[in-house]
Every structure is written in structure tokens, then in C-alpha cells.
Image (spheres, rainbow, N blue to C red):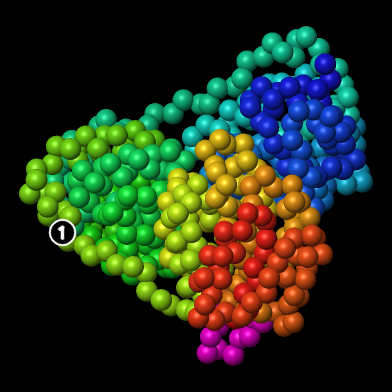
Amino acid sequence: MTVSEYIIDFLLAKGVDTVFAYPGANVLRLYALLCESSVRVVLTRHEQGAIHAAAGYAKATGRAGVCIATSGPGAANLITGIADASLDSAPLLVITGQVPSRYIGRDAFQEADILGITIPVTKHNYLVTEKDEVPRDLEEAWRIANSPRQGPVLVDITSDLFDAQLSPESFEFECLLPRKRVNPYPLEASLTKLAEVIKSSHRPLVLAGGGVVSAGASHLLKEFCENSGIPCVVTMMGKGISGKGFDNLLGMAGLHGNSSANTVLNQCDLLIAIGCRFSDRTVSDFEAFGRSRTVVHCDIDSAELNKNLKVYLPICADSADFLSCLSDIGEGLSPSLKERFSSWYIKSEPTIRSKTDPVYKAIRKYENESTQSRIITDVGNVQTDAARIITVFGERSFITSGGLGAMGFGLPAAIGASFAAGDSESFDSTTRMILIAGDGGFQMTLQELGILSECPVPVKIIIMNNRALGMVNDMEAGKGGKYLLGDTPDFSLLARAYGINSKRVDADENIESTVLSFLSAPSSEMLEIIY
């Protein structure tokens, strides 16, 4: 068995059915054999498209997305997507080709030290120069990427290995085990204090982040909040928590959050933060915030505890385990406490802030009727407005570039999510991948329109075209800044050049019905809205 054949068998054994790739000389043998295998190979139009598509697949499923690229510029073009996955804890297995081992360090054609470049943005990475190291390194990489806290792992393989025959000894390996660490903040030791602090509070609040989504613990969160009467707000990454029947879920808090969520965040006397990292977008003044309330913080990564915000009770545990214990505490609360907890807050609908809001309300209405659809956003005002207004009705149904905020993420991520949805039997004819993009971000990866026809689930592209970098322009409002894009292309014409049905409309009072009609059509299409 050659190394290339082994890699394909390895992926199939792990249940990988889809790989997002862009070929090149130093990975060509592996790519060619992949195309002959039962693995579905999605040839993107740029390596950045491949890595964002793999991330979209991972964020939609919780399973590792797989991406393959060649050496040098191919591998370097993956960096933005790897950094996005790292900050958002999305599992990725990234396989890159490298120049032959005898040329490493000699500035060979298309050589780049991808190992050194990616150290800061990967959970782990490998440079493989010996053929018999491939089985062990791949197995370790897969385990690391998928183990909590999930993240991207890169395996860089020199091109002279792909045709090399593996020796029998290469299959007799032992994976390096993670170093055992003493948990500095064990859950079991904190339960008594946790119950006491909840019972003594008057205005408790749960702040749920992406860790709740990764743990698949939306139902446990909902159960606890319902049993205890305690309201819940989410971070941007926590938008993947299902809001279906979740009456005391108040929406996203923070810099771009809605008013009811931010009101309770500012007024609570106890904050139970679960699976979040207290980014500057959620809490702007860490010291003042920590002084004003008691904070309980649970995260699976102990490095996140007391990193940005000094807390009263840090707990290092999986979100699902923590919420199971919380549910037990919630069931034991007295009726008077539950009444007190459920009566201190007011839930309100997000307020109208701009003329784009009716579009988001139409999307929310459609998603409520088709709970298996997913919302994918690019970055900028389209992202923050969507997160503020849209209620997610299916788990993992809000996909975005959270920590990195990478413009151009939206289109390839929607494609990746479509392939993920196409492999599930739970999706029906009303399911859509609904992409919301601005004219600025969309132009960064618009070449991926070339593979839209391959998507198994319709991708509905809505472009908010204001001919400007909207968020940046808003930041400089009144300061003379004009971050305008000038004459942007007619995106609807561009879509038709790729064989995609499209429509260009001006925003008007009927835009909500226009959007609903557009979403109902059963094919991948584009709607460009001019503001």
C-alpha cells in the first residue's frame, strides 16, 4: 500500500465522505487517487475557498472538515481559514503537500515553511518526511482535531512520500497520548458553592457561548433555564443554540447585541458563563464588569478561565457535564426562587435600526417554518445585524466567522454547509443554506460561484449592496472617512455568467415579501438588494 492509498483508506475509515481541495504538483498523486475513490472531492476555485468550505462543513456538523492543498502558495492561502477555525474551535484536518524532503530548506520552487507559519493558528501540526510516520501522525492528528477543545490540525507531507510503499512496521504504532494535567478547577469540587451562589442571587443570568454548541448541549441549556426560570443570552458563537421553544432565551448580548439581552447582562447580579471566552465584543470593560456581579465561568479549556475576566468561581468541565449538574440544581430550587428568577427581566423583540432589518425578519420567518435551514453570514454589518435579529430554530443553524471575522468566509462556508446537509436524512425540500453577504466581503471569494451547481442543498445568496465597506464606513461617520467601493459589479449579471438564476432589486417596502418568495424557490439563486 502506498502512502496515498493509505490516506484515502484512513479518511474512509473515519467516515469522511467529502474533501475540499485544490491540486498542485506536490500533492497531485494524492489528489488524483482521491478522485478515483469513493470520497467526494470538491474542487474549489481558490485554496481560501477550500478551507472556508471545510470550516463551514465542520461548523454545521461538529465533525472534522477535511481540506487538501499543495505546497508554498497553496498552503499559505489556507492561513486565514485555519486561523478562523482555531479561534472558533472548529475541527479541521488539513493535509498539504511539501517539496521533496531532499529540497527542504533550500528555497526550492514553491517551498514555504508551512509548519512554522501555522504554529500559532493550529492546535497541532506535523511535517512528515518519513513514509512510515504517516499512519501514526494521521491518527494523532485526527484525535487531536476532534478531541475537546476541537480545532485545526495540519499535516504537511513531502511529495516524495505519496508514491512510497509503506512497510508492515508502519502499522504497528502507538499514538502519543496527551499529557495528563491536573484539573485546577474540577466540577465536582464546585457544586456546593455553585448551588449556594445561585440560591443567594436575585437576578441570575446564563451567558452561553460556542462551547455549548460544540457539546451538543442546547437541550440541556433549555431544560435548566426552563426549570429554574433563569434567562439566557448568547455570544456570537452561541447563536448556534436552538431557540425553538426556548422562551427565556433573550438573544445575543454584547457590542452588536439586542437591547433586552444587553439590559439583563448589565443588570444581573450573578452571571453563569458557559463555553465562552469573554471576548471584547461581549464585554468591553473586563475589570468593571467583574466588580459589579458574581461570575461563574465554566469552560473545557482551563486557559480561558481567569484569562480576560477574573471570576468568583472558575470551573473546568465540558459544557454538557456542567449543564447536567446545573439541571439537577435547577430542579431542586423552591417555587419562590423560580418565581423570583423568572420575574426580573423583560423580553422584547429586536428594534428596527436600519432599512435592511426587514430582510432579516423575512429570513427569520422562513427559518421558523423550515427549521432545518441554516443561516450563513459573511462579516460586517450583515453579520452583526443577522445575529441581532434572527432567531435560530435548529441547532448549529447559525454559521459565521466569529473570533477572526474573516471577510469572504460566507460563500465557501455556505457551500461546505450545503454538502454537510446533503449527507443528512433529516433535511427536506424546504431546507436552504441562506447566505447573507455584503458587497465587500462577497467580492473576496466570489469565484466559488463556480461550484454552486454541485451543491446538494440549495444555497440562497442575498447580497446587501450599499457600494461600501459598511461597518468600516460607519466607524468613520462624521470623521470624513469614505470607505466606498465605487462602481461595484452587477452581481446578478455575474451570477448569470456562472449559470445561476439571479435578480437585482431596489430595497422598498415590499422587500420582505420579495425575500420570502426568493427563499421559497427550490434552487440555488442570488438576490442582490440595492440600498
Residue 306's x, y, as percent? Answer: 37, 49
Secondary structure category for the residue under label 1: loop
**Considering depth in this image, is 198 or 529 the residue closer to the camera?**
529
Q: Indicate whether residue 480 is drawn in magenta.
A: yes
Task: Look at label 1 and name its amino acid.
Answer: Ser
From the viewer's perspective, is 58 left or right of 68?
A: left
In the image, residue 496 sits, relative to residue 397, either above or below, namely below
294 relative position to 243: left or right:
left
Location of residue 409 (image quadrant)? bottom right
Q: Residue at x 61, y 58 (%)?
A: 521
Query: Is residue 508 shown in magenta?
Result: no
Reply above or below: 93 against 341: above
Image quadrant in which the N terminus is located: top right
Viewer-closest of 438 and 357: 357
The reply to whether residue 492 is in sight is yes
**Residue at coordinates 57% horizontally, 79% vertically from top-left?**
507
Label 1: few (<14), some or many (≥20) within 10 Å? Answer: few
Q: Where does the image place residue 190, in percent across and percent down from the top left?
A: 24, 36
The main secondary structure of the magenta stretch is loop
- Quadrant in the rendering for residue 30: top right
Residue 446 lies, in percent from the top left, at 74, 62
Residue 255, percent across and down?
Answer: 42, 68
Q: Which residue is painted at 64% across and 68% down in the image? A: 527
Q: Is residue 109 left or right of residue 431?
A: right
The magenta stretch spans which residues? 473-484
> Number of labelled discs?
1
Examine the image and state in which quarter residue 315 appears.
top left
Residue 185 can be seen in this image: no
Q: Which residue is mark 1?
A: 343
In the rendered structure, the answer to whether residue 64 lies left or right of residue 293 reads right
Image quarter where the C terminus lies is bottom right
